Amino acid sequence: EVKLVESGGGLVQPGGSLRLSCATSGFTFTDYYMSWVRQPPGKALEWLGFIRNKANGYTTEYSASVKGRFTISRDNSQSILYLQMNTLRAEDSATYYCARDGGGNYAMDYWGQGTSVTVSS
Amino acid sequence: QIVLTQSPAIMSASLGEEITLTCSASSSVSYMHWYQQKSGTSPKLLIYSTSNLASGVPSRFSGSGSGTFYSLTISSVEAEDAADYYCHQWSSYRTFGGGTKLEIK
């Protein structure tokens, strides 16, 4: 059974940093791209970025809204995905989801339950 | 960046009604995915690559389209279909539409 479990969310002050984790199981982690998606309360989904699979060198791509502030990485030995978030702003407050991403023309077929981040003083 | 515009923003449907949700892209895309998100839960893949049903999705759901116009149809709405629906493209990075909220009368 494919499982993705996010953790690390919480309350952080503006300008602060936070690292989210996504523990995965039930599939060969290195075969897949992995994406991060967020959703502010009552708003639409927003793709943040992905990290490619082993075959594609684990390279990353980011949306313009977070490029330079957020960094996606992966620990392939433990099948964990990370999202390092720096210089956080109030508008970064959202539920953050990790998702298994087929890459290329494929969909994000499995999602975690999400972890909530609130940026406030 | 390709912008996806979903219509309508809110749809109210009766049980058994056939409905169609649409997604318009600012530039041509090769395929479209659709996700269903029920209140308080994470998104669930509904349709991939425009017209393929994800595992376990009822056959009353179907997808079609090409170029800049795509649609999701529910042939006979059921109470459990109340949810937000999002289209998603990856032809140029990945973007989501703004969503359509489906309410059941």
Image (cartoon, coloured by chain):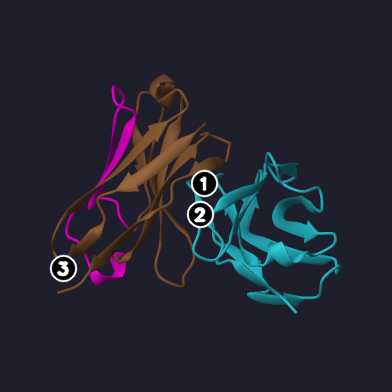
Find residue A17 and name its label.
none
**Dot 2, crowdedness within 10 Å: few (<14), some or many (≥20)?**
many
Which of labels 2 and 3 is toward the front? 3
The quarter of the picture where residue A24 lies is top left
Which of labels 2 and 1 is toward the front? 2
Residue wearing tag 1 = B92
The magenta region covers A66-92
> In the image, are marks 2 and 3 on the same chain?
no
Find residue A14 and name its label.
3
Which of labels 3 and 1 is toward the front? 3
Find residue B95 and name its label.
2
Report the side of A29 relative to B50 (left or right): left
Whole-percent x, y for residue A98 in the image: 40, 45
Mark pair 2, 3: CA separation: 26 Å
Mark 3 chain:
A
Instruction: Inspect the image, locate mark 1, and give the three-letter code of the amino acid beneath it.
Output: Ser
Question: B52 or B37, which lies in front?
Answer: B37
Q: Colour of chain A?
A: brown
> In the image, are marks 3 and 1 on the same chain?
no
Q: Colour of chain B?
A: cyan
Instruction: Inspect the image, locate mark 3, and give the three-letter code of the amino acid beneath it.
Output: Pro
Instruction: Inspect the image, locate mark 2, and give the three-letter code of the amino acid beneath it.
Output: Thr
